[in-house]
Amino acid sequence: MLITASGTYMANLSEDDFVKFNIFTGQNYSERKVSKETPMHLGIYQKREDIKAILHSSPFYTTLFACSNEGILSELFVETMYYLEDISYIDYFHPGSQELAEAVTTQSFHSNIIIMRNHGVVVLDDSLLEAQMRLQTLEMACRMILKAKESGIKLSLIPQKTVQSFLNDSFYKPKKKMNNSIESS
């Protein structure tokens, strides 16, 4: 896998800020030290063969929701129905801890978005482009929900029956199935 090196400034990444790391042997092919969050990424990649991209981030609105008990709605518009269908939450664990890695890995069997309470989010998908779209949709939904509350606008949710019809029958994109069979291995 490629992962950011320890101490990188995320807003200004260059090619030298990434470390090539073997997910099976633990070998670091770089001079730089890997991110302290490597165990979390390794757990997902080792257990979810379908995952090719993981983004661990703390965008403002998503992190605001991670620091609250406010729910994130997926029944708002096309992209939220598709990308935010399954969101999992885990309690706070210290960054880089084995407890965090285990909690995130466990939830990765149930969701491609894992909100880490009082920390941020982990988004996983089968490509970097899809992971970015999932993260952008999440951030937009959190901002939309907050702005609606601030301005007193009541959001209209798409009925659950319509959501299921969209996910199963609309041909927007093929619905991604969770690869739960790997959990038992």
Image: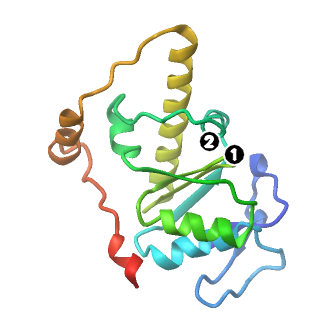
The type of residue carrying mark 1 is Asn
- Give the residue displayed 42% in from the left and 33% down from the top: 73
* Residue 4 place in picture, x, y as percent: 72, 64
Query: Are the residues at dot 1 and dot 2 in contact (C-beta closer than 8 Å)?
Result: yes
Q: Residue at x 57, y 36 (%)?
A: 69
Q: Can you give x and y, in whole percent of width and height, for residue 94 in the image?
A: 75, 60
* In this rendering, position of residue 181 left or right of residue 1: left
Q: Name the residue under label 1.
A: 118
Q: Is residue 27 above or below residue 182?
A: below
Where disc 2 sits, the SS reads helix
Which of the 4 quarters of the picture holds residue 54? bottom right
In the rendered structure, which amino acid carries the disc numbered 2?
Ala
Is residue 85 shown above or below 159?
below
Quick one: quadrant of the N terminus?
Answer: bottom right
Near mark 2 (Cα within 10 A), the count class, few <14, some 14-19 or many ≥20, is many
Determine the image quadrant of residue 30: bottom right
Asked whether residue 129 appears in the rendered view, the answer is no
Quarter occupied by residue 37: bottom right
For disc 2, the marked residue is 66
Residue extending farthest top: 152
Q: Residue drawn 82% across and 74% down?
A: 33
Judge by depth and name the residue closer to the eye, 31 or 46: 46
Residue 107 seen anywhere in this rendered image of the structure: yes
Q: How crowded is mark 1: few (under 14 residues within 10 Å), some or many (20 or more)?
A: some
Quadrant of image for the C terminus: bottom left
Task: Give how far across and how far down residue 79 sits, in percent.
Answer: 37, 37
